[in-house]
């Protein structure tokens, strides 16, 4: 193999390697704070709006079902994981805490569903943030 | 919140499946056609899973 061949084989690898850039950092931060905004800022309008509506609808349906919004805690493991999941919703979670939404005791099956809806809204937002990052670094169109 | 939205187990599961599948489709596939197909696939798997889990629980409950 000549030097030229080596250069040809190395070029695609170095181009496809993920890297952090300013756009990617902003996409992560903004996408976490406002669900779907990481896509919207990259002009992926339909994807961004669908992600925003999905995450926000899940979150607010959870609240409407009297779901609980977890607070930072060092108690039960499931409560800690619930907080981590909720935190993924970013701005929705912060707004919920500021407005004292979801500050309830879970007393019915629907409230338990609501709690899960809120946690999953956060986890789905984490997935959408990762997707926005992949778009920003050029790994995905 | 005083009035709670009352959903049945099934409707809650279907709503959950719908929005989760939409996010999965968008985030785990690269082009529009594949996104729609994968979202529909995930939704179908969720709903079939609901029916499957329902039947399993029915037999376990006996």
Image (cartoon, grey):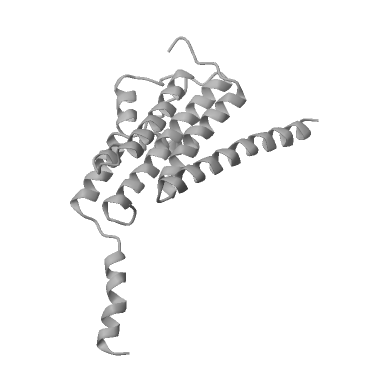
Q: Residue furthest left?
A: A22
Q: Image point 58% across, 22% down: which residue?
A: A109
Q: Residue A34, located in which quarter of the rendered image? A: top left
Q: How many marks?
A: 0
Q: Nearer the viewer, residue B59 or A36?
A: A36
Residue A76 in sight: no
In what quadrant of the picture does the N terminus of chain A appear? bottom left
Give the x, y percent position of residue A112.
53, 25
Q: Image point 32% across, 57% down: which residue?
A: A139
Give the x, y percent position of residue A6.
29, 83
Residue A34 in sight: yes
Q: Is residue A21 above or below residue A91?
A: below
Q: Image point 64% across, 38% down: which residue?
A: B48
Q: Residue furthest right?
A: B62
Q: Residue A19, located in which quarter of the rendered image? A: bottom left
Q: Image point 57% across, 30% down: which residue?
A: B13
Give the x, y percent position of residue A74.
41, 36
């Amino acid at each position: 193999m000549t030097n030229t061949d080596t250069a040809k084989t190395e070029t695609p690898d170095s181009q496809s390697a993920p890297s952090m850039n300013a756009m990617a950092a902003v996409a992560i931060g903004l996408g976490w704070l406002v669900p779907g905004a990481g896509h919207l800022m990259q002009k992926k309008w339909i994807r961004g709006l669908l992600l925003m509506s999905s995450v926000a609808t899940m979150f607010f349906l959870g609240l409407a079902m009297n779901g609980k919004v977890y607070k930072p805690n060092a108690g039960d493991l499931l409560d800690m994981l619930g907080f981590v999941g909720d935190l993924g919703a970013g701005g929705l979670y912060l707004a919920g805490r500021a407005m004292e939404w979801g500050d309830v005791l879970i007393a019915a099956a629907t409230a338990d569903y609501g709690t899960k809806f809120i946690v999953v809204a956060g986890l789905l937002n984490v997935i959408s943030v990762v997707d926005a990052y992949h778009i920003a670094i050029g790994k995905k169109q | 919140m005083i009035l709670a939205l009352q959903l049945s187990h099934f409707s809650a599961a279907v709503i959950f499946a719908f929005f989760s599948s939409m996010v999965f489709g968008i985030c785990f596939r690269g082009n529009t056609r594949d996104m729609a197909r994968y979202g529909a696939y995930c939704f179908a798997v969720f709903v079939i899973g609901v029916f499957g889990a329902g039947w399993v629980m029915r037999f376990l409950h006996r």
